[in-house]
Image (tube, rainbow, N blue to C red):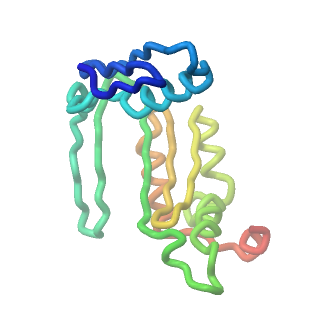
Amino acid sequence: QIEHLHPKIGTPVLVPEPKIVILFINEDVTMKFCFLLLALLLGCSSVKENKTLSGNIHIDVKELKLDNGLTALIVNNPKLPIFSIQLFYKVGGKNEVPGITGASHFLEHMMFKGAKKFGANTMDFIIEGSGGSTNAYTTNDQTVYYENLPSTELEKILDIESDRMENLLLDVEAFNKE
């Protein structure tokens, strides 16, 4: 199917499935211009319409709502000996006002300083000692904490997360260092 015929540039031919551009180049057209045009046309039409990968992927997500308002989305994959947990708090930069800007990110850091049951540096020691990893980030509208560990440590991590969610230590010395 020819969509456009231009006497100076050549003849672009657009083939609908997959979208391919073929240029028949006249001698007076520079190669640089042709490569630029080709890159532009291919870049704008490189995805096949009405087809996505999501049609081939099925993830069984179970939703659990607790009485305290916490929502848990759970995906079980018994083939893997690991787990990943992500905790999303609906607070970030947009909740800050002049005078407390950066507070969400500051508290993100304080969440790694310990809690009542699991004191300072205990969390990192347990996670890294089990072969796991942990980190967090803050955006404009959320603060996210995550861990990846062997499945045998799931109960321990849920205990740690519930402790720091409810009993965060705001030690003056750690506070001042941050």
Number of on-image labels: 0
Res 80 quadrant in image? top left
Closer to the camera in the image, 165 or 19: 19
Q: Position of residue 162 (x, y in %)?
A: 44, 60
Residue at point 51%, 54% (across, down)? 145
Q: Is residue 170 above or below residue 108?
A: below
The correct choice, above or below, for 60 with respect to 138 in the image is above
Q: Which residue is at 57% across, 70% downward?
A: 104
Quarter of the figure with residue 59: top left
Q: Is residue 38 left or right of residue 176?
A: left
Question: In the image, is residue 92 above or below residue 78?
Answer: below
Foreground residue, 94 or 7? 7
Left or right: where 60 falls relative to 46: left
Residue 64 at x, y percent in the picture: 23, 54
Q: Quadrant of the N terminus?
A: top left
The part of the image, by quadrant, that contains residue 34 is: top right
Residue 98 image point, x, y percent: 62, 85
Residue displayed at 58% across by 39% down: 133
In the image shown, does 128 or 86 lie closer to the viewer?
Answer: 86
Picture coordinates of residue 3 (x, y %)? Answer: 28, 27
Name the residue: 64% across, 47% down: 124
Rendered position, 131 above or below 92: above
Quarter holding the C terminus is bottom right
